[in-house]
């Protein structure tokens, strides 16, 4: 039986169409595919970024997709006859392109911000997972976290200035100058100078209580330095918890425990003034935050033992964070501490700071970042107590007193910095800060301070 001949042109056309029907293979550069990039911090298509080259593929600029071969003469199967020099069956042999690999077609294009949800309390909308970078300046980024902070400081020379650290000296109350003064009285008054100039220590029983509540000195004596405490060393341990209800809003609580060591007053320890507050980020983007914070100070510490101010206070402020690159960060704050129902010594204190941090070491699991900060306080109103040469007590206006500190430390973060979907370059789960600060000015809350801090983000 005679076989039917199949035109060679038809075979060529069918083979050509078969070779072009497989899915196109996206040409993806080597590197971590599918990882979103931090806007403006590298990772342009085909160029290395902080997490490796940006992938290319369908719908992404720079994608390279093979096109099917052109049939000679532009004909379809059966539409004509192959001409000499057209493709042969050997030319069409070889593997058929398989499914595209190396990228997730459902992921956003390179440069689109993607925020990690598992490290943030909110469950919807854009979500951020950026950790703190400072050591002493308040963090601008609302985050759910637990923090334990320990400070040890030395050389406070005016602890009652504007009633910022603790209440005005109890000697004002004892001698009838200001009955709203609630500060330390242990050990006061007990250092007196006799009429001949010699120093004498008297027991409390030697002082007579007057009808107005003040104490009369023994005859022929005067109080040495009015009982003012010339030096305070202190330690504070501060547990802190913050919960971020949305990507822009969080509320926090800290309950410091304080120990003080004085020269004249008795040593003391216990709870200090509790602080509660909230943060709201007006600007909340992957590389920058501008946040309004309000902090309330509750007078839970015993003022007569130097553990608190003896009055409530409110402190509104602005906090700032900016990523300058994938490793370098800038941050700052401006806050106004406002006492409520304070004694005549109390006054407003403006605090401000600017700092920078750089991830000197940054791997997929750890980052080590030196931190430098400059922090200042300027007293806007209030008084400072001083001893007169005659052994009495004088008060001077503290407005204009300025204190400047330098702070130097290192923050060590542990996390997964290359996870898919984690656009943040500071995606810590845990971090530790160790830092030291010292005063540049004669006025100071302390001459030296050491801080150790641990944070866990949830």
Image (tube, rainbow, N blue to C red):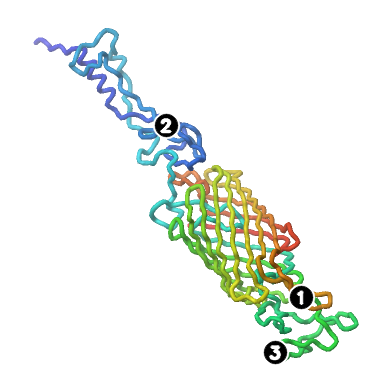
Residue bearing mark 2 = 28
Residue bearing mark 1 = 394
**Does residue 78 appear left or right of residue 169 in this picture?**
left
**Mark before the other along the chain sequence, 1 or 3:** 3
Question: Which quadrant would the N terminus be assigned to in this image?
Answer: top left
- What is the distance, in whole Å, between disc 1 and disc 3 at their CAs? 20 Å
Q: Position of residue 74 (x, y in %)?
A: 25, 16
Relative depth, front residue between 168 and 414: 168
Q: Position of residue 291 (x, y in %)?
A: 51, 57
In contact (CB < 8 Å): disc 1 and disc 3: no
Quick one: SS at disc 3? loop
Residue plotted at (22% across, 19% down): 14
Q: Name the quadrant containing residue 199.
A: bottom right
Q: Position of residue 348 (x, y in %)?
A: 63, 67
**Mark before the other along the chain sequence, 3 or 2:** 2
In contact (CB < 8 Å): disc 3 and disc 2: no
Residue bearing mark 3 = 212
Label 2: few (<14), some (14–19) or many (≥20) C-alpha neighbours in 10 Å: many
């Amino acid at each position: 039986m005679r076989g039917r001949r199949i035109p060679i042109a038809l075979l060529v056309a069918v083979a050509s169409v078969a070779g072009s029907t497989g899915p196109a293979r996206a040409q993806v550069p080597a590197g971590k595919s599918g990882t979103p990039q931090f806007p403006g911090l590298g990772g342009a298509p085909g160029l290395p970024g902080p997490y490796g080259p940006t992938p290319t593929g369908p719908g992404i600029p720079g994608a390279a997709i093979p096109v099917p071969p052109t049939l000679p003469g532009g004909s379809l199967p059966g539409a004509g006859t192959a001409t000499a020099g057209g493709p042969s069956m050997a030319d069409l042999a070889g593997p058929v392109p398989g499914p595209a690999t190396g990228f997730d077609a459902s992921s956003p294009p390179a440069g689109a911000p993607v925020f990690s949800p598992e490290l943030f309390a909110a469950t919807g909308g854009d979500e951020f997972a950026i950790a703190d970078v400072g050591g002493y300046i308040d963090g601008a980024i609302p985050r759910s976290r637990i923090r334990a902070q320990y400070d040890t400081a030395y050389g406070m020379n005016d602890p009652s200035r504007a009633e910022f650290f603790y209440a005005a000296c109890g000697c004002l109350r004892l001698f009838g100058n200001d009955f709203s003064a609630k500060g330390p009285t242990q050990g006061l008054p007990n250092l007196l100078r006799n009429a001949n100039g010699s120093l004498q220590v008297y027991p409390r029983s030697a002082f007579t209580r007057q009808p107005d509540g003040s104490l009369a000195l023994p005859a022929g004596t005067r109080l040495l330095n009015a009982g003012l405490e010339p030096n305070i060393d202190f330690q504070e341990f501060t547990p802190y918890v913050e919960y971020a209800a949305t990507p822009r809003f969080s509320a926090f609580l800290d309950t410091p425990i304080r120990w003080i060591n004085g020269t004249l007053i008795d040593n003391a320890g216990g709870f200090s003034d509790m602080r509660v507050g909230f943060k709201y980020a007006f600007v909340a983007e992957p590389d920058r935050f501008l946040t309004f914070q309000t902090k309330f100070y509750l007078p839970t510490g015993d003022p007569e033992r130097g553990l608190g101010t003896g009055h409530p206070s409110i402190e509104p402020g602005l906090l700032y964070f900016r990523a300058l690159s994938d490793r370098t960060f800038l941050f700052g704050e401006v806050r106004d501490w406002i006492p409520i129902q304070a004694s005549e010594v109390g006054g407003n204190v403006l605090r401000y700071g600017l700092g920078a941090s750089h991830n000197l070491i940054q791997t997929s699991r750890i980052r080590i970042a030196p931190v430098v900060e400059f922090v200042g306080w300027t007293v806007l109103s209030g008084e400072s107590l001083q001893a007169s040469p005659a052994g009495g007590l004088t008060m001077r206006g503290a407005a204009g007193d300025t204190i400047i500190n330098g702070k130097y430390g290192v923050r060590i973060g542990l996390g997964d910095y290359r996870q898919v979907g984690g656009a943040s370059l500071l995606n810590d789960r845990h971090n530790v800060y160790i830092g030291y600060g010292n005063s540049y000015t004669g006025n100071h809350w302390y001459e030296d301070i050491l801080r150790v801090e641990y944070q866990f983000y949830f």
